[in-house]
Image: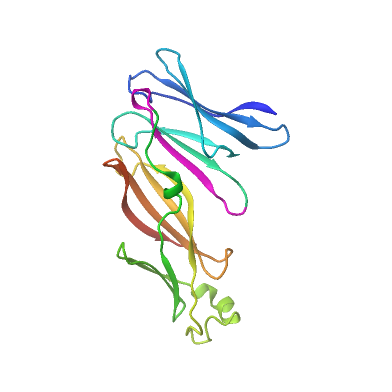
Amino acid sequence: MNNVIADFKIGDVNGDQIPDYIYLTGKKEVDSNFVYNLKLTIKDGFSGKCNTYPLEFDGGYNPQLFLGDFNNDNVNDIFLSIPTGGSGGYIYYYLFSYLNNSLFPLFNDKKFKKGLNFNINYEDNYKVKVSNDSLNKTFIIDVTNKKDLYEELNIYDDNGMLIKPTKGSILYLGGLFPIQYYLDNSFELLAKQRIIGISNADTLGYVNSLWKYKNKEMNLLDITISILG
């Protein structure tokens, strides 16, 4: 077992305009890439004082830090991503403000990682309807490229008519990425959720949602669909 620094960044996170030192540390077995017992340590650039914070989800592969202003206070916030590995591809995320040396979460990962809920319904003519009534959003995905497979599985007949009601599903958050959507000094978060059809291997596309921290919570700005081309 070795103590390791999984990631390290330099930047002002407490608002005194002096660069601080941000460490993501943990433990790792010699023959493994899995880092566990992860802790966030922040060393004040002015005083040299260190504060260490344990993380609730404290183990993963290649955990990473990112510094950027997400809440428009002109001070870097701390974004963490911790991939857990495995077939599910789950990644835990944290977003903290450290203004005035006080660690404050900007979103709840347990709630946020569930993502948005959409109904995925197959329709005639090799179409899949992706809809969320509460958001008043509907998208149509053309799955003609899968017609041979779907006809073989008796989902469609050879005229493209649906033989039986068939549903797909949308998975929990598969990726969360800091971006500068407005090309200013602050960052937004782009969330990606995979849309699957008849099985986990049957990827139909992705729901992309854009989020902005405002009024003490994450606010949805936009939703788009992307498909494999």
Is residue 85 visible in this depiction of the protein? yes
227 versus 158 height, above or below = above
63 versus 152 height, above or below = above
Q: Position of residue 105 (x, y in %)?
A: 39, 36
Image color mode = rainbow
Query: For the view shown, which residue lies furthest in the top direction?
Result: 47
Q: Is residue 157 left or right of residue 97?
A: right
Query: For the view shown, which residue lies furthest in the left direction?
Result: 215
Depth order, front residue of 205/40: 40
Q: Which residues are magenta?
A: 87-102
Residue 89 is a magenta residue:
yes
Q: Quadrant of residue 180?
A: top left
Q: Position of residue 4 (x, y in %)?
A: 62, 27
Depth order, front residue of 2/9: 2
**What's the residue at 57%, 51% (across, down)?**
89
Q: Is residue 193 left or right of residue 180?
A: right
**What's the residue at 31%, 62% (across, down)?**
135
Query: For the view shown, which residue lies furthest in the right direction?
Result: 31
Instruction: Locate the N terminus by quadrant.
Output: top right
Q: Is residue 192 left or right of residue 181?
A: right
Q: Position of residue 28 (x, y in %)?
A: 66, 32
